[in-house]
Amino acid sequence: MFFRCLGAVDDQSGAGYAGNIWLVARRQNYSSIVGFALARVAADECELLSLGVASEYRANGAGTQLLTAAMARAVAEQARWFFLEVAEDNEAALRLYGAHGLEKVGYRLNYYENADGSKTNALTMRCALPELA
Ligand SMILES: CC(C)(COP(=O)(O)OP(=O)(O)OC[C@H]1O[C@@H](n2cnc3c(N)ncnc32)[C@H](O)[C@@H]1OP(=O)(O)O)[C@@H](O)C(=O)NCCC(=O)NCCS
């Protein structure tokens, strides 16, 4: 399955200003959106705020394409570091991030609240981004 990652269009929200990265993934030759990534650049750091792929399209490479597209946009925005938080039990995300050079740099106790009221710890992860040639 092939995906295209595009900057979001019809942006009325202000998210399109320099420093905000808002990407959607579409299946090749289909118009419906199957995933998205939101990130924000501040100073020399880009923080991945949210990344998601519709459950029926997961494990087909869309998450990888969204992450790499977000990193490329961060480099274009002159960010030197890429940073995110992830639940410590999120195996798919941890595998994705680990494969793209993100390393654990911190730990946030009881950071996420689950639907049943229980809490999950978060890991913070970071990697250096290449300099723009
Ligand atoms: C995390 C997420 C974005 C990955 O998207 P995806 O389209 O499935 O990602 P990819 O297909 O590019 O796969 C990335 C890696 O995750 C692995 N993976 C995918 N689904 C997996 C699963 N259920 N369990 C373990 N690993 C999984 C893939 O095998 C792949 O690793 P590999 O290249 O070493 O084989 C997706 O699972 C998702 O939307 N999850 C819910 C939201 C979420 O957790 N977002 C991240 C918040 S920080």
Image (cartoon, helix red, strand yellow):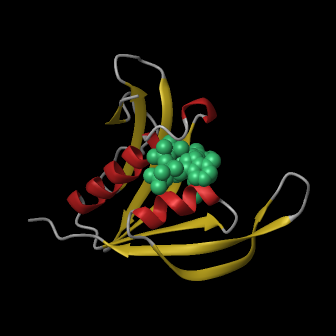
Q: Left of 35 or right of it: where is 112?
A: right
Q: Left of 74 or right of it: where is 32?
A: right
Q: Residue furthest bottom?
A: 106
Q: Residue furthest left?
A: 133
In the rendered view, tell whether residue 125 sits above or below residue 40: below
- Measured as percent of width and height from the top left, residue 62 is found at 44, 40
Residue at 61% x, 74% y is 123
Image quadrant in which the C terminus is located: bottom left
- Measured as percent of width and height from the top left, residue 53 is found at 54, 39
- Measured as percent of width and height from the top left, residue 122 is found at 67, 71
- Measured as percent of width and height from the top left, residue 56 is found at 60, 30
Residue at 14% x, 65% y is 132
In the rendered view, tell whether residue 60 sits above or below residue 33: below
Q: Is residue 30 visible?
A: yes
Front position in the image: 22 or 69: 69
Residue at 63% x, 35% y is 55
Q: Left of 53 or right of it: where is 6?
A: left
Query: Total marks drawn?
Result: 0
Front position in the image: 133 or 18: 133
- Residue 124: image quadrant is bottom right
Front position in the image: 75 or 123: 123
Image quadrant in which the N terminus is located: top left
Front position in the image: 121 or 23: 121
Q: Is residue 37 visible?
A: no
